[in-house]
């Protein structure tokens, strides 16, 4: 299997983001064709028909006018928007956590990227409501893709935090780690945030050394994935380990261990007799393991 044959969840987005329409799109909506995705505190909201995309006619006019709205893009003549609802307004809908919604494959694969886009930008609005230059409350602009400060004039744009996630191998052995918040028996690829002034290769070697005490050699890019919890870009790399002795940073990891390629193959097939289970299908960590054993 080539990396190009793998499509991580959230990596396919059916929309043209249509940046050219953003300046005035919220004042020029088309109620007969527009579709709205409702979100609240990381939850996808469903109507009585279990649908997450709703027309303007299905929504209260006050909601369309007052709720935070982000233009996501368009396809086949239909424009898509995300609306952010307060918990009180969300009570009239069924709320499903985004991750559970994706795991249940509630929408086609080509719509997962749309969900990632929406949740990431909406989350950014709520966590960056004030100007970082002067502290004044900023206001949404540019179709929801910018916040403007009415006091000092600063413009602020959505951020994405890059994370390196590492398939670390030494011959036919692969290094897996366990975080304290993982479900029982879950082990996964090591990962960490990139720091300013780093390449992804440097970040991968640094994180590997800091978390496990393993010295990394060659680093190769494999694949990447938007991860909207709230807004990361997971950069999947293959690191060829130069050492195997482990010195685990117990502030970061509960445990780490080397496992064989055959064990990984069995785990991917659901073998419950192993001392570990691997990441679920929506995680790029699983894609990296699938790439390695193919």
Image: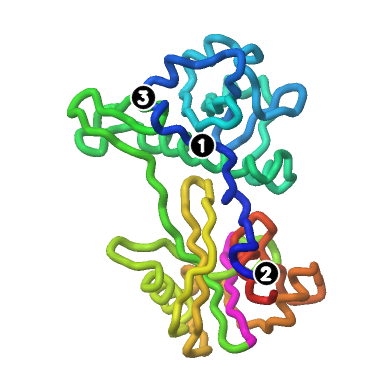
Inter-mark Cα distance, 1 to 3 = 16 Å
User: In the visual, does 193 lie left or right of 154?
Assistant: right
Q: CA distance from mark 1 to mark 2?
A: 30 Å
Mark 2 or 3: in front is 3
- Secondary structure of the residue carrying tag 2 is helix
Residue 270 in view in this figure: yes
Q: Which residue is mark 2?
A: 290
Report the mark closest to the observer, 1 or 3: 1
| Residue under the point 47% across and 69% down | 251
Image quadrant assignment for residue 168: bottom right
The residue that appears at 47% across and 47% down in the rendered structure is 231
Vertical placement of residue 284 versus 249, above or below = above
Residue corresponding to mark 1: 16
Which residue is under mark 3?
Answer: 23
Magenta stretch: includes residue 144? no
Q: Nearer the viewer, residue 12 or 52?
A: 12
Q: Which residues are magenta?
A: 172-181
How far from the left and from the top, in percent, is residue 154? 22, 33
Q: Residue 252 location in percent, x, y? A: 48, 68
Chain-order first, disc 1 or disc 3: 1
Q: Position of residue 157 (x, y in %)?
A: 34, 38
Secondary structure found at label 3: loop
3D distance between C-alphas at marks 2 and 3:
42 Å
Q: Callout 3: 10 Å neighbours few (<14), some, many (20+)?
A: some
């Amino acid at each position: 299997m080539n990396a190009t044959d793998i499509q991580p969840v959230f990596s396919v987005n059916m929309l043209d983001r249509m940046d050219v329409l953003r300046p005035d799109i919220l004042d020029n909506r088309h109620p007969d064709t527009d579709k709205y995705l409702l979100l609240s505190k990381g939850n996808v909201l469903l109507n009585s028909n279990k649908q997450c995309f709703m027309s303007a006619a299905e929504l209260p006019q006050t909601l369309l006018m007052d709720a935070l709205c982000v233009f996501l893009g368009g396809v086949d003549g239909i424009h898509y928007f995300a609306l952010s609802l307060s918990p009180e307004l969300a009570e009239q809908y069924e709320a499903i956590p985004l991750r559970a919604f994706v795991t249940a494959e509630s929408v086609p694969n080509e719509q997962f990227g749309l969900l990632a886009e929406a949740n990431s930008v909406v989350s950014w609005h709520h966590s960056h409501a004030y100007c970082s230059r002067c502290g004044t409350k900023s206001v949404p602009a540019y179709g929801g893709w910018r916040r403007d400060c009415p006091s000092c004039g600063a413009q602020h744009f959505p951020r994405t935090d890059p994370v390196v996630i590492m398939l670390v191998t030494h011959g036919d052995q692969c290094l897996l780690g366990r975080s304290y918040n993982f479900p029982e028996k879950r082990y996964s690829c090591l990962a960490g945030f990139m720091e300013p002034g780093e390449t992804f290769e440097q970040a991968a070697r640094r994180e590997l050394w800091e978390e496990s005490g393993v010295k990394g050699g060659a680093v190769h890019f494999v694949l990447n994935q938007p991860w909207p919890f709230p807004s990361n870009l997971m950069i999947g790399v293959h690191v060829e380990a130069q050492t195997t002795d482990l010195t685990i940073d117990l502030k970061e990891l509960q445990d780490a261990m080397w496992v064989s390629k055959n064990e990984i193959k069995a785990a991917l097939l659901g073998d419950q007799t192993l001392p570990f289970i691997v990441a679920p299908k929506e995680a790029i960590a699983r894609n990296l393991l699938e790439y390695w054993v193919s």
